[in-house]
Image (tube, coloured by chain):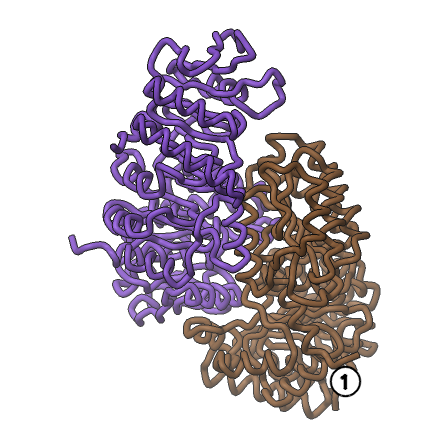
Chain colours: A brown, B purple
Amino acid sequence: MTNDLQHLFYPRSIALIGISTNPLKFGGGFWINVLHELGYSGKIYPVSPKLNEFNGLKVYPTVRDIPESVDLAIVTIPAHLTPQFMEDCVYKGVKFVQFYTAGFSETGEEEGIKLERELLKIANRGGVRIIGPNCMGVYSPKSGICWRYDFPRKSGPLGIMAQSGWNAVEIVKLGATHGVLCSELISYGNASDLNESDFLDYFASDPETKVVASYIEGVRDGRCFFTTLSRVSKIKPFIILKGGRTDAGTRAVASHTSSLAGTNEIWNAVMKQSGAIGVSSFDELIDTVIACLYMEVPKNRKVGLIGSGGGPSVTAADECESAGLQVPPFPDSIRQNLNKLMPKEGTSSNNPVDSPFLWDPEMFGKTIRTAAECTEIGSLIVHAEIDSTIVFVGRKVIAQITRSIIDNARNCGKPVAFVLRSVGTPEARQVLHEEQAKFVKQGLPLYPSISRASKAIDNLIQYNQGLPEK
Amino acid sequence: MTNDLQHLFYPRSIALIGISTNPLKFGGGFWINVLHELGYSGKIYPVSPKLNEFNGLKVYPTVRDIPESVDLAIVTIPAHLTPQFMEDCVYKGVKFVQFYTAGFSETGEEEGIKLERELLKIANRGGVRIIGPNCMGVYSPKSGICWRYDFPRKSGPLGIMAQSGWNAVEIVKLGATHGVLCSELISYGNASDLNESDFLDYFASDPETKVVASYIEGVRDGRCFFTTLSRVSKIKPFIILKGGRTDAGTRAVASHTSSLAGTNEIWNAVMKQSGAIGVSSFDELIDTVIACLYMEVPKNRKVGLIGSGGGPSVTAADECESAGLQVPPFPDSIRQNLNKLMPKEGTSSNNPVDSPFLWDPEMFGKTIRTAAECTEIGSLIVHAEIDSTIVFVGRKVIAQITRSIIDNARNCGKPVAFVLRSVGTPEARQVLHEEQAKFVKQGLPLYPSISRASKAIDNLIQYNQGLPEK
């Protein structure tokens, strides 16, 4: 009875159910405009008993009246009208129905729960698959399906599944800001029919998707979820931010998508045993995505830290080890080579390396290559601070430092994560934005703090340790 | 034998020891230029045997040759020359000597350790007090003393003490970015003579300083530190970021300021029993400073969360409770009043409150006041997201939302923390920067995430619970 989800993300035709005469209303009409804007090339069928035409498209009174087959119906009509509509879908043989409409089990009220159950019963009868209700549904840049004008038109390697529309937006926009675009996205709300496990399977088999980021409030079928997650996590990294990890979060989940959040103990055990990557914030989520996409897997948790400043080196070491990595002292041979590169006073060739890169980008580049020769460490974190660097040597030297860091790190033979820090002065923000683009362009992992870089590396290692031997 | 530190931060005359003929060299000459730039109004005496004049000032061959008394000497000459120089200071009766010069105990080498001990012995003989060595020393905006052109000229309520110059800069710039200026700052490196306890005492008694932020790598006299910290923490909040909380951090500390980092267990016990506020990052440090300065102390850990979006409300609740606060359900009476304000669909009047503020800033303001009527909660966190708000309603409505939030929150009778979130799109960064200025101007606590706001509130409550009953 499972439909292949290919036609959900790449439908040949879409029916929009519920076209308002009020152009400001967020409904089917809005969707149609966005589909046009993003260049959806399939057929679009507006459905409303009140209109004959919408933006040059013929409007059909019901789904039954649509002359051709319908792969996806996007529904914005009030909840009490949905059972009759679903009967029409069964009659018509619609493949997928995505309900923006809310007012079902998430209300916690008997009526809504009953309505959701009824909808599902009708759909099952005809093999129609439901997404939601109470969800934003599909974003599929390659097929031009979206519900926001500001989402990227281009696609990328990140699969996204989220029970919340707003949190889906957060992931898309965070990704775009970091240069990571989306293959497909599903926002699936109450998950009354198609659920987390179906989408896990889809993303596991989708060739463009290299890593999956998800926001999950609860699972509909725990056993199936665990089995599926364990299987797909061996294929590619599945990163999960769990909504409802606390008492208040659990209550909020119940009124949001009526999901059973489950206890933290069970959830943590599922994460650990399945080999998925559990994260606790959107920042950690995107950081881990970046590590999975752009970093070779370090052979161990030992890191070489290279930066500038005595105090910042102490702080860097603390942040790195607090995140689960180790910063071991370098062997004498490496220290001797490093010492040849650096002035004696106010530097340190031990790990962390404190090198006055401010004044000499080339020396800093050589320092990276020399530290990378240490066979004991599995990766490097190279960090620089923007605000003071602007003050002392100006914008131009920062560009030289960045170039030297990138050139030398790319060929150093070790996975490298980069950190450009700033306290956020307006000028530094601008510089950071421009420098960041260079890292993004080269597909290099750039982070705003040692803590965040370290945690992402730790997650990457953790994930790969759980994979079967090659 | 203790000098009053007033003349360290407000010296009537400063001698600069070590003026290079190379204007690019970072030494006494650089300091003189910054002192001029910041408008230091006392006497400046350059000291160098090689020059007769520097930038229009007469240069003296030794400290002994200076015709008047010297409150503060700032020293940049090589380490091996410092004992003779200190003899001159004793002869001259110099009050304070601050050594930028490194190459002492922090090298870990016998020679440096011996030199530092010798220096101290000579100084003790004449009652000269040493800051450092291996430090940046004083930043005192009211007296125009500084070592950076980019430090604020104006003073404020934040006292800063840091064993690292770079990390001192980090705190100053983080503070300035958040509108929090500095009363006085001391960067004190190896702490061979004047140490953490002396500075604690100074800041405790300084009337302009309302809260103290510190970066400490180790303490010279543990018993004295604990006693002093316990005493001064009852007077005002002392926030401490400890450097060397991990194995690698501890090693880095040894080579940075030769401090004994001590074990985490001891340090945590000292923090807890003394009533100081321990933090684990610069972000948490500045967040806590802002809470201490700008928030009334909440009467309990129960928080009302007000924002927009189902998923974001779940995430907000999780972040808030993970930071140690509680988000209890609102009583029916409050919920009923909230329900009168909001549309029924897609909202929640429970705590967290999910209100569609995007469309109605005034309603959002009323929501804040209504939630504040709940007598059970001690504070409110009001959160909004910038990126989507720009997309949907534009820049102008964001300004209206901010105004409504600020106006209604200020008079709601409860302490309120504000969160403006953004994934960091360039436009949102600009908007955030402009909106942030409004909060700063009004002295209102604004944070970039619920996590950070919650942790700061938790620290504020923790601190005040440790204070004796009034």
Task: Give the camera-side residue of B49 and B462.
Answer: B49
**Which image quadrant is residue B430 in?**
top right
Query: Measuring 49% from the left and 81% from the top, which residue is drawn there?
Result: A265
Mark 1: secondary structure: loop
Viewer can see residue B188: yes
Task: Give the camera-side residue of A101 and A234.
Answer: A234
Q: Is residue B286 left or right of residue A215?
A: left
Label 1 packing within 10 angstroms: few (<14), some (14-19), many (20+): some
Viewer can see residue A185: no
Image quadrant containing the N terminus of chain A: bottom right
Chain of the residue where label 1 is placed in the rendered structure: A
Q: Residue B238, percent across and down?
A: 33, 47
* Residue on which the image places disc 1: A3
* Picture layout, residue A53 above or below residue A465: above
Which amino acid type is marked by label 1? Asn
Residue found farthest to the left: B470
Query: Measuring 76% from the left and 66% from the top, which residue is drawn there?
Result: A183
Query: Measuring 49% from the left and 68% from the top, which residue is drawn there?
Result: B314
Q: Is residue A257 left or right of residue A88?
A: left
Q: Residue B294, percent across and down?
A: 34, 45
Query: Measuring 39% from the left and 44% from the top, which residue is drawn there?
Result: B213
Q: Residue A121, percent across and down?
A: 63, 91
